[in-house]
Image (cartoon, grey):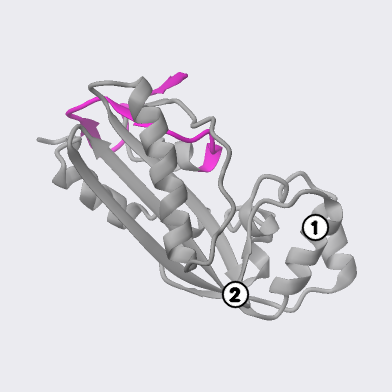
Amino acid sequence: MGDHQNSRGIFRNLKPLVLASKSPRRKELLARLGVNFEVSPARGEEPKPLNEEPSHYTLRLARAKAEEVFQKNPGKAILAADTIVVCKKEILGKPKDFSDAFRMLNLLSGKMHQVFTAYVILDGQRVRERVVETRVHFKHLQEEEIKAYLATDEPWDKAGAYAIQGIASYMVKHIEGSVTNVVGLPLTELIEDLLFLQIITWRSM
């Protein structure tokens, strides 16, 4: 567990917050705004999708993570999130190996895909949860282009085998919706809920 503090952002905490994720992207997004938090990743195995909508599946994953970490951190607010990529009704998680990553990027090439991020905030008996969808349109990718990208370290721990904030940003022709949602946390909605629950407030107040 680590503690992340930033006195230069525009928010300050009213309550202790625990991020139930080891994602460096989520940590960076929160810390940049000045939100202070501890990190305590969920350890449980992610369940496989059932016959359910992608939004239901990703919310189920986020709930499971939040509930697990909540049990270990009494008296603290818990934030858990999960992000999935969906193309042609197939849910794309993190790639298992080179061939799996190649298959994912080849599937995304020249098409629109959806990115769903669900988050859950548990604060005692109070709960706020949402699922945010962003539509991402990819350029057509050549085979050698995909192989060159896979030669970097970027794709391996990312849903859909790409990072919109990294090298793969040039592959994106345009998006419909939140950019930070694709990175891993829809900040507009999340900050609204953290303020509503009075977990954070503006630093000037």
Q: Residue at x 40, y 29 (%)?
A: 69
Callout 1: few (<14), some (14-19), or many (20+) C-alpha neighbours within 10 Å? some
- Magenta-colored span: 1-25
Is 79 magenta? The answer is no
Q: Position of residue 192 (x, y in %)?
A: 22, 52
Query: Does residue 158 lie above or below 8 as drawn?
Result: below
Q: Splitting the image into 4 quarters, where does residue 10 fall?
A: top left
- Of residues 34 and 81, the one nearer the viewer is 81
Q: Position of residue 164 (x, y in %)?
A: 59, 58
List the single residue furthest toward the front: 51
Which mark is drawn over residue 89? 2
Is 53 displayed left or right of 101 in the figure?
Answer: left
Is 7 magenta? The answer is yes
Distance, label 1 to label 2, CA atoms, is 17 Å
- Of residues 8 and 140, the one nearer the viewer is 140
Q: Is residue 101 visible?
A: yes
Q: Pointer 1: what residue?
A: 100
Indicate the secondary structure of the residue bearing disc 2. loop
